[in-house]
Image (cartoon, rainbow, N blue to C red):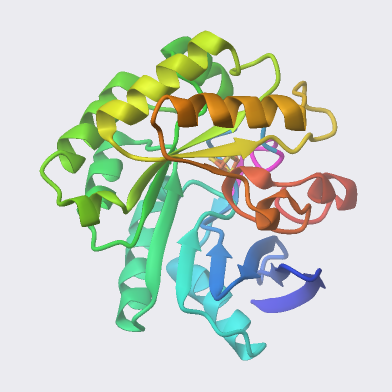
């Protein structure tokens, strides 16, 4: 693998790495964190995500996962945190992800995950790892809607039950390692009723919500929520007593951020994650 290109802005560095079989893999560096990819393309095929649009090309080997870190450090970036939050679902390349996890662990890095929680068996294993944070992307509060947004997904009720059983006995300090991600999409999952249900789920689990704003992607049938409605949803959840965080400046930049942000640019360049 070798670095093909680094695209900078004042907040993020997006590192494009070429594999030996000519795929481009992406990592994003920001604030001592390297957000890495676990797959080339993504088999989950979330209907709002550019990375999922063309499905999975192949899994990354564990060496290729680690190499994203080695190549970023070779550029002089100081990295203390790894986030499995780039392209791909780490639970669907689980053996390689686990191997890479333990290798990162040996380097004393703090390791966190963004996941849709599928398959459940691997999600349970992930919960048991000595990780530094898990954000479960739910994006919908009913099975039907979630299947539409995240076609390859576990049953939401089962997923939340597993998370609840895991979190319940934990100390308050440990509970802080968990959160839910909810990508707010205009006229799709932003009704009052849905936000109410979302608040109830977070309250029951006693964990925060990372409320993400959708970055519109050419050719996909979704629209971004206005700033006003985004703020309204945020305030609504806050008033319900939920700890909520908003999309960071890092994520809303087109070249930066993690997980669901991918990316108009990929489509335009027809490079990147297919
Ligand atoms: S949002 Fe994440 S899990 Fe869904 S298709 Fe995109 S990369 Fe895959």
Q: Is residue 64 left or right of residue 197?
A: right
Q: Is residue 208 magenta?
A: no
- The residue positioned 46% from the left and 72% from the top of the image is 81
Residue depicted at x 52% and y 28%: 139
Q: Residue furthest front?
A: 239
In this picture, is 109 found above or below 177?
below
- The picture quadrant where one finds residue 11 is bottom right
Along the line of sight, which residue is nearer the eye, 113 or 229?
229
Residue numbers of the magenta segment = 50-57
**Percent position of residue 55, x then y:** 62, 38
Instruction: Residue at 77%, 74% (x, y): give it.
Output: 4
In the foreground, 235 or 76: 235
Question: Could you say where residue 245 lies in the image, as x and y percent from the top left?
Answer: 52, 44
Q: Is residue 224 visible?
A: no
Which quadrant does ligand 1 occupy?
A: top right
Between 44 and 77, the residue placed more toward the observer is: 77
Q: Residue at x 69, y 79 (%)?
A: 2
Residue 54 among magenta residues: yes
Residue 11 appears in the picture as rendered: yes
Q: Residue furthest left?
A: 169
Residue 180 horizontal/vertical position (percent): 42, 38
Q: Position of residue 86 (x, y in %)?
A: 58, 55
């Amino acid at each position: 693998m070798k670095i093909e290109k680094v695209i900078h802005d004042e907040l993020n560095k997006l590192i494009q790495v070429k594999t030996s079989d000519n795929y481009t893999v992406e990592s994003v560096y920001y604030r001592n964190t390297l957000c890495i990819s676990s797959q080339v393309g993504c088999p989950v095929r979330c209907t709002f995500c550019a990375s999922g649009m063309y499905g999975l090309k192949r899994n990354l080997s564990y060496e290729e996962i680690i190499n994203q870190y080695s190549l970023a450090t070779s550029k002089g970036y100081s990295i203390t945190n790894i986030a499995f939050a780039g392209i791909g679902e780490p639970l669907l390349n689980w053996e390689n992800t686990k191997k890479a996890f333990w290798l990162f662990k040996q380097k004393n890095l703090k390791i966190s995950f963004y996941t849709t929680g599928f398959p459940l068996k691997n999600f349970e294993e992930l919960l048991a790892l000595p990780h530094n944070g898990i954000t479960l992307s739910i994006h919908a509060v009913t099975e039907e809607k979630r299947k539409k947004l995240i076609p390859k997904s576990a049953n939401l009720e089962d997923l939340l039950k597993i998370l609840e059983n895991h979190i319940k006995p934990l100390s308050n300090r440990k509970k802080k390692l968990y959160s839910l991600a909810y990508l707010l999409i205009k006229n799709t999952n932003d009704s009052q009723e849905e936000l109410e249900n979302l608040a109830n789920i977070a309250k029951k689990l006693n964990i925060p919500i990372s409320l993400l704003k959708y970055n519109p992607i050419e050719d996909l049938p979704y629209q971004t929520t206005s700033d006003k409605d985004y703020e309204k949803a945020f305030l609504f959840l806050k008033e319900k007593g939920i700890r909520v965080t908003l999309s960071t400046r890092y994520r809303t930049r087109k070249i930066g951020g993690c997980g669901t942000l991918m990316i108009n640019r990929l489509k335009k360049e027809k490079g990147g994650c297919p």
